[in-house]
Structure formats: structure tokens, C-alpha cells
Amino acid sequence: MIPVGLTEAHRDKPDPATYLGSGKIEEIATAAREAGADVLIFDTPLSAAQERNIEKAAHIAVLDRTELILEIFQKRAKSREGRLQVELAKLEHLSTRLVRGWTHLERQRGGLSKTGGPGEKQIELDRRMLSERVKQLKVQLKKLERQRDTQRRSRTRGDQMTVSLVGYTNAGKSTLFNRLTRSDAYVANQLFATLDTTARRCWVGGSEMVVLSDTVGFIRDLPTQLVEAFKSTLEETVHADLLLHVVDASSEVREDQIDSVNQVLSQIDADTIPTILVYNKIDRAPAAAGVVRDEKGRVRSVGVSAVTGEGLDELRAAILEFAEHWHKDHPVKARELEPWEQAKLEAEARRAGKPTA
């Protein structure tokens, strides 16, 4: 999708029929035709009626903000769970605009029942088909969620802290994750490059290792359908002992992005989890470098560059400092390790990023 034009409009309140008013829509439609545009994208949610009216007036396809994000998610989803979650979100959204949705629903026919009572109206059949498929998806996702819970329990021990990376999309979470864990999770300079949660053990100092997870990026006004559909994936965040809120330090709107992430964390009941702000990309914004503490002496923020490695030692030290306090609240009965257990832990620590002597 290549942008060919941008128009901004300001109104005291949205027009109920076309959001921007018929005159502005005609102006935009003319500019779109002259530029050879195939679709009009509105950076705001539109009602089904508004989309229909705009398409009718402009004679061009229309996508609102929610539909655009869903399209991007569909292209990025790689795992079976990710694809099922996106499909569920799209169908939940489609159920609110069935009048214009039949052509989209046709693509889903392979997984839907086609039976219906005699004389059943098309809209009723559409609704039944959607409902059946949504139920199927929820059953499949519930099964995958149970598998995820089992995997989470198997990779965490009672004495091992869990840390989750969260942040606005494209803040550099996956690059930072790879740096800290010496792994090769997928990285790309694009929105929502990561949709599937990845977890690795990560060495943070001494003999301390934590389980670090990389999660889907957040965005301003993340559609409710996506929050609901990706709830099981976002649960990795809810179960964390510590959040590393990764921020693009070079962004001119970083404070707005921080607020957007905090809003989503509140939506999924993760806003009370202890959090360290990690200002990434300090190679582009040197002013964000260093460690900042609050009035109680606890680390509030750390500046790093996941690309150059600057600040990573300070970040590990901050995690280790938190872990030391965490262990006091989560005591485990100590025992002497067998030689084979010690060797296994040492090998695991090296894989997780501990430097060799």
C-alpha cells in the first residue's frame, strides 16, 4: 500500500452521515481520483453507515483505522495462533457491518457451515455463519491458550523471575530482546513486526537469570477487537513480575506513545505490575542516556541503544537490582546443586548471554 496523498480536516463534531461532511468528501474524492488512489483510509473509526455513504459519494473503496490495523495484522501473522487471533478480530469487527461485508465473508466460506432454514434472509444467514465461525475460533484459541499456560509453567521455576518487554510498535523491543538474550527473533523496521510472543532465558548478572518475553507492540487507540482477540498472547504481560516499557527516545511524540501503552496495560489489568522505562535508540537521542531513580531510590528509567549496546550493562544491573528485592518476597528452600545440575545451569547461562571467562 503506497500513500499518494494526505488530507487533514477539523470539525467540532463528526458528521453522522459521512464523518467529514459531503463537501469535504467530494473534495477528497476529486483529489483521490486525480492521484490515482484505489482506497481512502480514514485515521479514525467509522460506523458502517458512514463507510457506505462515503463509498457511495466518492465511488472509491474506504478503510477506517480499525480495518487498516486489522489488514496489517493479517499480513504480519505467522503462527497458527496469530492467524486465528487476527481472523477472530476481523470477524468480530465484520459482525458490526454485515450489510457491506458479504464479499469479505465469502472468503471465509471454507470454514463455515452453509445450512440455513427455508426462507432465511441473507442477513440472518450471514449472522449465523459468522457466529458459528467465531465459536470455532474461540474453541481453537482456548486450546492453544492451555498449551501456552503449560509452556509458561515449564520454562519458569519458582526461583526465576519473569520479565516482559512492552512498548509502542516499532520502539525496538525485538532488537533489544535479541541483544539481551543473544537470540535471533524476527526484527524489521515496520509496524507490528512481532505478533507472536517469544520467550528466552536471559542472564542479568552474577548467577541471576530471568525469563524474558517479547510481545506484540501497542498503538494509539488499539481496536477493542484486537485487544480481546490477542488476550491470550497479552497474558504473557499480565503474568510478568517486571515490565520493561521500551520507548523510542528519538520519537517526537514519545510521551503520547507512553500514554497509549499505559492505556492498553490498564485494559488488560497489567497497570499495577512494577515497570522500568527503557528509553531505546539513545544513539539518536543522547539526552535520554543514563539511569534515573525515583524518590525511594528505585530505578525509574534506563537509557539504552539496542543497536550499539550502550546502556545494556546498566539495564541488566537494574533488572538484577529488582530481582534481588523480588527474591526476598519469593523465598525458595536452598539446596546444594549436583555437579550435573551446576554444569547445566552454566551452559544455560552462557546461551542466555552470560559472558564467558
Image (tube, grey):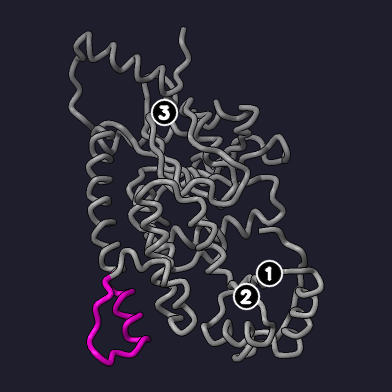
94 on left or right of 2: left
Find residue 168 and report its horizontal and vertical position in percent.
56, 52
Whichever of labels 1 and 2 marks the residue nearer the N terminus, that label is 1
| Residue at 22 percent of width and 49 percent of height | 146
Q: Which residues are magenta?
A: 113-132
Q: Secondary structure at mark 1?
A: loop
Left or right: residue 7 compared with residue 278: right
Disc nearer the start of the sequence (1/3): 1
Give the amino acid type for the residue marked by disc 2 in the picture: Ala
User: Which corner quadrant holds the N terminus?
Assistant: bottom right
Front one among 45 and 103: 103
- Given the image, on which type of amino acid does mark 1 rest? Asp
Q: Which mark is residue 156?
A: none
Q: Which residue is mark 1?
A: 38
What amino acid does circle 3 point to? Cys
Residue at label 2?
61
The residue tagged 3 is: 202
Which numbered disc, 2 or 3, marks the residue that appears first in the sequence?
2
Q: CA distance from mark 2 to mark 3?
A: 47 Å
Where residue 260 appears, as percent x and y from the top left, is: 55, 60
Which of the two discs, 1 and 3, sits closer to the camera?
Answer: 1
Q: Position of residue 326 (x, y in %)?
A: 34, 37
